[in-house]
Image: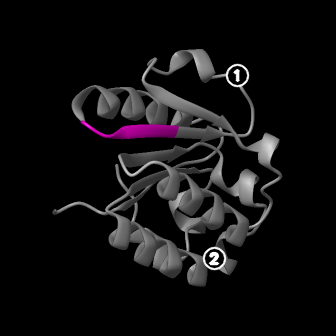
Amino acid sequence: EDFALIQIIHGEKGTGKTKKIIAMANSVSESIKGSTVFMDDDTSYMYDLGYSIRFVNVTEFDIDNPDQFLGFVAGMAASDYDLEYVFVDRFLKIIGHPLDALEEFFGRLDRFTAAHKLIVVLSVSEGTEQLPEFMKLYVVE
């Protein structure tokens, strides 16, 4: 495969990231055989998603750091062998950690997605200047 298993949609607040990640999830879910999960920290966009997409409100699962997030995604992958895509809106708000502290986490996520052939798409509320170098290779336009 010639595309990244981790993809980041980024931009300042109010630049249309949520609309973009929802459109991407809807488009993908119509064209793949496997399953799609969309994670968010509230339910305001739940009904904008296609019926085949499993919506997860992460506030119901008390996730507040990168390790818990990775464990949660691993648990979903373990319980659904057909899981192909995980979309995560407001990623930084969910994990509660600054970007520059996430290099090790992204290394682990990279290995996990490769091992399980899982594509994880994250929306990140930061401009290009704020993105650490290690994250720039995951950015999709």
Mark 1 lies on a secondary structure that is loop
Q: Earlier in the sequence, mark 1 or mark 2?
A: 1
Q: Main secondary structure of the magenta part?
A: strand
Q: Position of residue 37 (x, y in %)?
A: 50, 39
Left or right side of 59 for 114: left
Q: Residue at x 39, y 52 (%)?
A: 81
* Residues rendered magenta in the picture: 33-37
Return the residue nearer the eye: 125 or 115: 115
Q: Position of residue 127 (x, y in %)?
A: 56, 56
Q: Which mark is residue 124?
A: none
Q: Residues within 10 Å of mark 1 (few under 14, many from 20)?
A: few
Q: Is residue 33 above or below residue 4?
A: above
Q: Is residue 34 magenta?
A: yes
Left or right side of 56 for 140: left
Q: Residue at x 54, y 38 (%)?
A: 38
Mark 1, residue position: 44
Mark 2, residue position: 102
Q: Position of residue 11 (x, y in %)?
A: 54, 48
Return the residue nearer the eye: 20 or 111: 111
Q: Is residue 44 above or below residue 65?
A: above
Q: Quadrant of residue 57?
A: top right
Number of dots carrying numbers: 2
Q: Is residue 62 magenta?
A: no
Return the residue nearer the eye: 139 or 35: 35
Check the picture and name the quadrant holding the N terminus. bottom left
Q: Residue at x 80, y 40 (%)?
A: 60
Return the residue nearer the eye: 23 or 40: 40
* Residue type at numbered disc 2: Leu
